[in-house]
Structures are given as structure tokens and as C-alpha cells.
Amino acid sequence: MNLDGAEITVLGAGVAGLAVARALALRGAVVTVLEQAAAIEEVGAGLQISPNGAAVLRGLGLGEALEAASMRATAVDLRDGLDDSRVLRLDLARLRPGQGYHLMHRADLIDLLATGARAVGVHIRLLQRIETVDLAGPRPRLVTAQGAELTPALVIGADGLHSKLRGALNGVEAPFFTRQVAWRAVIPAEPGAAPVAEVHMGPGKHLVSYPLRGGTLRNIVAIEERMRWAEEGWNLKDDPMSLRVAFESFSPKVQGWLEAVQETWLWGLFRHPVARVWHRGLPDGAVAILGDAAHPTLPFLAQGANMALEDAWVLAAMLSRHDPPEAMAAYQAARAPRCAKIVAAANNNARAYHLGGPLRDLAHMGLKLGGWLAPGLALKRYDWIYGFDVTHPGHPAH
Ligand SMILES: Cc1cc2nc3c(=O)[nH]c(=O)nc-3n(C[C@H](O)[C@H](O)[C@H](O)COP(=O)(O)OP(=O)(O)OC[C@H]3O[C@@H](n4cnc5c(N)ncnc54)[C@H](O)[C@@H]3O)c2cc1C
């Protein structure tokens, strides 16, 4: 399809929505983003952008903005949370030339994507909560919370875990609790903090931390297994003391960080299975979903936003080449197997990170041994994730 002048409506101004909006606008489309919030904001927390996501940002012409807003990580360190000994190091200096692993504030990523989208004419409309998505007619029909009715021909749902479009395509189902909760906090970083993403593993819980914003801040995500989430909402402001108590068996280094936490929020981690249906062609229109709307994941591989960036590139590329129903089918065929594999690998990491008892000692010993014998191998095991570049001329989606 020639995207020049094609009108496309995107639901949601998160990573997926803003990235696909810029990708489509760069190919000539006239894009409107409908966002429910009153302002484009993100929670105060960090994000790891791995080489596969960074490649998309560079492909979208945002490489310089990414470098300016992020820190390049030198390693991902898996550590024993209890005694702080190193279990395995992914030495990121071994990445291929040109690849970078970035640590950044979420708000900075959203800001660079929103600025990048607006710069190519994307119209972002705030306070536009879509309450109903109806796919029974010739065109998608959207009804906003204010009762306004819209019937754009092409709609892309980047509306996250609680996506209305996902429900319209797959039937409405409540997301399920993954039996994991996450505290998030940002503290001042210690001077000279190395740009390393540290994963501190303990029985039934783990904690991820890395510096942000030129090493002035330190991001903390602390995960704990819980049988149920009894709260009304998806998150709640929590007492930093509950976080300290939950991780009191961890090393003095971790406890020192947690002592500095002044404010924290606790999230119940919910998800859906990877959606069965990602798109539909209508007599006079078409719809597709991407990002968390299509494949919400546990954050244990730090790939949710990276997959959303890959989706955005592939969907825009397919739409520029084929008519919408065919483009969207090709998009799902290209993306669904990879996303399902990443989601499954993130689930496996939950088990591996949270081992207890003799199994834990055995697993740590195996990883340590592997790291000593073949230090390059650890990173190679992630090549299928980090080495995947949807923007590369050799990639089918280019
Ligand atoms: C603790 C934690 C740590 C993480 N760390 C990483 C990491 O390091 N790296 C990584 O790649 N990923 C990470 N992730 C995952 C990542 O945050 C998500 O996968 C990513 O943000 C999904 O982006 P999205 O745009 O698809 O959805 P969202 O960010 O949820 O955006 C959806 C947007 O749509 C809007 N919206 C929703 N419903 C409506 C509606 N009805 N009408 C209008 N607008 C609507 C919302 O307001 C929002 O702006 C982490 C997740 C968690 C929980």
C-alpha cells in the first residue's frame, strides 16, 4: 500500500504506539494517536533497551537522541543476592560492533519517541479514552469516554495490557495474575556507579538494579513471588519498609540501596497469553495490535518494550509494501513466533532466578563454571534476542 497520505489511527501513546506512529509517518502516513491520559508520562523507573530495540530506534532516525538520553551498559551481572558473589557475567563489550545495550529512564524514552513522532507530523490527542471498539461494520467503530464516535479505516491498537482492540479481536478476558509482584523505586546513585545491570537472585525473589541519567540515579526493580494479589487496582503506593523486610536476607549492598528508598510502588504483575488473533480485515478497513496489547510478558528478560519496538518497525514496513489485510497477516506471521518464544523464555527466567535449596547451589555452580570455561558463551546464548535486527537490509521485514 502506498502510505503517502494514508490516514491511520493509533490507540495509545506508550512505546509501541509512539514508535509505530513515527515509523508510519516517516513512510508518508498521516497519523493520529489517541491517548487516554491527560499528559504523556511514564512511571519513574528505568528501562533496558537491548541491541534489537536500539536498532529500531536507530532505524527510526532516533539513534543520536538514544545515545544522548541513555547510558551504554558494559555488562549484565547475575549475582547471588544473598552474598553478592558473581554467578555469571554477560560481557557486553563482546557485542558486535555497532550494537549497544542502553540503560535509560522510561520518561526519557517516551519523551524522545513523542518528540520524534510530532517532528514528522503525528498528531497526539490526549484525554481520548476509547471505551468501545466495534468491528461488526465495514469500518472499525471507536467510541470515546466522552461519547464521541470515530470510524477511521485503519486502526492500530497499542493500548497495552488492557487493550480494547485485543478484546474485540480475541474476546474479552481478564488478565491473569502471574504470582509475581514488583516494587519499583529510583534512588540517588553512588558516585562512579558502573553502567552495569545487576540481577541479584534469591529463593523466591530477585532484584534488578542499574544506574540511570549519567549515573545520577539508580533504578531498582524488586520481584517477589506471591500466591495472590488481593488489591483492588494494579498497583499501590507501598511502605519502603515492606520492601526492606522482603529483601532482608539479601547482601549488605542490596540492603544499602533499599535503605535509600524514600518512595515505592508495588505492582501486581498480570498478563495474558500471546494473543491468538492480532489483526482483522474489514470490508472498508483493517485493524492490528502490537506491543503489550498483543504479547504482554513478565519483565525477566527486559524485552517488553524491545519487542514493541520491533513490532512497530515490522508493521510499518509490511503496510508500506502490501495492502492492509495482507500486510497485517504478514506482520503477525513474522512476529508471533518470536514474541511467543521470548515470553516463554522470560517465564523460564522467573524459575531460574528464584531457585532455592540444593538446586540453586547446583545451578549457580553450573553457571559459574560455564562462565569461567567459556566467558563469551554466556552472551552468545542471547544472540537470538539481541542479534535480531528487523531493520537490517537482509531481514524480510526491511
Ligand atoms: C517492572 C517492569 C520492568 C520492565 N522492564 C523492561 C525493560 O527493562 N525493558 C523492556 O523492553 N521492557 C520492560 N518492561 C516491559 C515494558 O514496560 C512494556 O512491555 C512496554 O512498556 C509495553 O509498551 P506498550 O506501548 O505496548 O504498552 P503501554 O506502555 O502499557 O502503553 C499503552 C498506552 O495506551 C494507553 N491506553 C490504554 N488503554 C487505552 C484506551 N482505552 N484508550 C486510549 N489510550 C489507552 C495507555 O495510557 C498507555 O499510554 C518492564 C515491565 C515491568 C512491569
Image: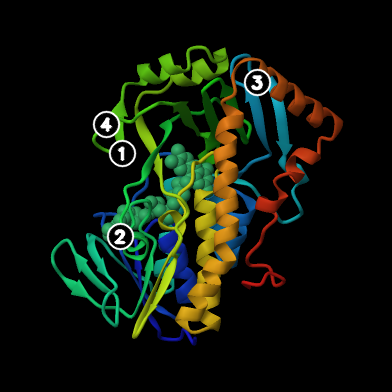
Q: Residue 389's x, y, as percent?
A: 66, 61
Q: Residue 230's x, y, as percent?
A: 28, 29
Q: Residue 346's x, y, as percent?
A: 56, 42
Reply above or below: 241 against 120: above
Label tally: 4
Question: Which numbered tag is attached to residue 360?
Answer: 3
Inspect this view and state whether residue 52 appears: yes
Q: Which residue is mark 2?
A: 164
**Residue at horizontal 63%, vertical 67%?**
391
Q: Are marks 2 and 4 in contact (CB under 8 Å)?
A: no
Q: Which residue is mark 1?
A: 234
Is 94 displayed left or right of 174 in the figure?
right
Choose the circle earlier in sequence order: 1 or 3. Answer: 1
Reply above or below: 74 against 330: above
Choose the circle earlier in sequence order: 2 or 1. Answer: 2
Looking at the rendered structure, the secondary structure element under dot 1 is: loop
Q: At label 3, which amino acid type do we have?
A: Arg
Q: Which residue is mark 4?
A: 231
Q: CA distance from mark 3 to mark 4?
A: 31 Å
Q: Residues within 10 Å of mark 4 (few under 14, many from 20)?
A: few
Q: CA distance from mark 2 to mark 4?
A: 23 Å
Identify which residue, 88 or 292, lies in the foreground.
Answer: 292
Choose the circle earlier in sequence order: 3 or 4. Answer: 4
